[in-house]
Image (cartoon, rainbow, N blue to C red):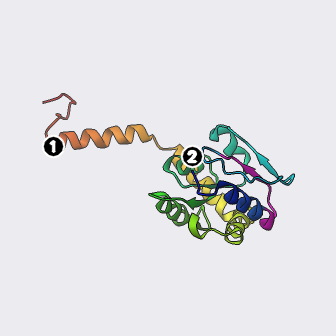
Amino acid sequence: MIARDPAALGLLLVEAARLAGQRLILSPGWGRIVPRTALPASVYVLEECPHSWLFQQLKGAIHHGGAGTTATTLRHGLPSTVVAFFADQPAWGRTLERLGVSPATHRLPSLSAESLALSMGAIANNPSFRIRARELQQMLGGEDGVANVVAAIEARLIKDGIMTPDCSAR
């Protein structure tokens, strides 16, 4: 995401990790969210990396709460917390909270290093978030989402008389 002051947001992330006593992999993305100052050894800047590999290496993720990233955290059994910029992101954050895989949803305008550090610490130190994330990973892995969507669309087309039950068009 693109922040008004990406360097300040990057510095806030680094400070939150310091307060939480956690290491941080900072992925600047399009918004170039990285501090202008020297980084401590506990922070690694990773320019580009597939989530499918990276998320298997982490205790948790801090992300913007986009639908794709949110789904990827769930598919990889990764607890996370959302820092929402706009649109549907707060809703995805609250969904993660309700699912029991996130301690909080943060909104960018009111984000503080202290509040984010609390979320980082909760993810790192409270095993219930990881346990629940792994349960959901198993549930999602057992579903055939494409087949479910196709069945739902076909059922609607049949109900509306656009298709017959043998899947031929009318």
At x 51%, y 65%, the residue is 94
Image location (x, y in percent) of residue 96: 54, 61
Q: CA distance from mark 1 to mark 2?
A: 34 Å
Tell which tag, 1 or 2, sits nearer the viewer: 2
Residue at numbered disc 1: 160
Disc 2 packing (10 Å; few <14; some 14–19; many ≥20): some
Residue 147 position (above or below residue 122):
above
At x 67%, y 59%, the residue is 9
Residue 129 lies left or right of residue 22; in this view the side is left
Tell me the amino acid under the disc marked 2. Answer: Thr
Residue 75 position (above or below residue 126):
above
Tell me the amino acid under the disc marked 1. Answer: Asp
Q: Which residues are magenta?
A: 18-28
Residue at numbered disc 2: 72
Task: Tell me which corner region of the image, top left, top right, bottom left or bottom right, holds residue 111.
Answer: bottom right
The answer to whether one can see residue 107 in this image is: no
